[in-house]
Image (cartoon, rainbow, N blue to C red):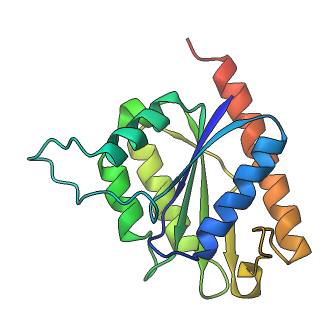
Amino acid sequence: MKVMIIAGSNRKNASSTALCRYIAQMLKDQGTEVNLFDLYEKPLPFYCKDQETTDANVKALKQGLLEADGIVLATPEYHGSVSGVLKNALDFVGKDHFDGKVTLSVSSAGGAVGVSSLTHLQTMVRNVHGINCPEWISIGGTQRTFSPDDVPEDEKTRDRVQRTVGYFMTMVQTFRRVKV
């Protein structure tokens, strides 16, 4: 089974990206093949419908999503929505990349939680025919503290992430079996 994780921050030490690395390690430990696409490390050009791009990072993003059985989209919450770099990345892809695939939305907010960005992500997923995982992960405040090896320091956060990722993977396995 393959899961594509898109870390949608353009900051080097973003807590949303640390959370992605934690989720990726959890999945790898369970035998899942993980493609972590970090938009800080692999920046994309600005999307322009009028221009076809030959950018290697755009090609890798598209191919990774095509091959994925499940998708995790992670974003910092900026002004009540998703980051510009994640929205830009999603503009390069569409129905072919998400159709029938379970997608988990994840956010990290400076305040208590990032619910607005999660609802925006779920709207985007619906519009490209993806299947939203009804659970999501939002961390904020002191929940955004990670050890040097990207493990959340808060035990409740670790438990919540583990439960939610387990639920997500059960959905991915179920929907993967029913594909025609």
| 180 relative to 22, above or below | above
**Residue 142 occupies quadrant:** bottom right
Outermost residue, top direction? 180
Kindly identify the residue that appears in the image at 43 percent across and 83 percent down: 79
| 136 relative to 179, above or below | below
- Left/right placement of residue 44 relative to residue 68 reads left
Where residue 3 appears, x then y in whole percent?
A: 63, 39
Where residue 131 appears, x then y in whole percent?
A: 55, 39
Kindly identify the residue that appears in the image at 83 percent across and 63 percent down: 160
- Left/right placement of residue 57 relative to residue 165 reads left
Where residue 161 appears, x then y in whole percent?
A: 79, 60
**Residue 21 occupies quadrant:** bottom right
Kindly identify the residue that appears in the image at 74 percent across and 60 percent down: 22
Where residue 92 appears, x then y in whole percent?
A: 30, 47
- Left/right placement of residue 99 relative to residue 163 reads left
**Residue 4 occupies quadrant:** top right
| 128 relative to 135, above or below | above
| 95 relative to 36, above or below | above
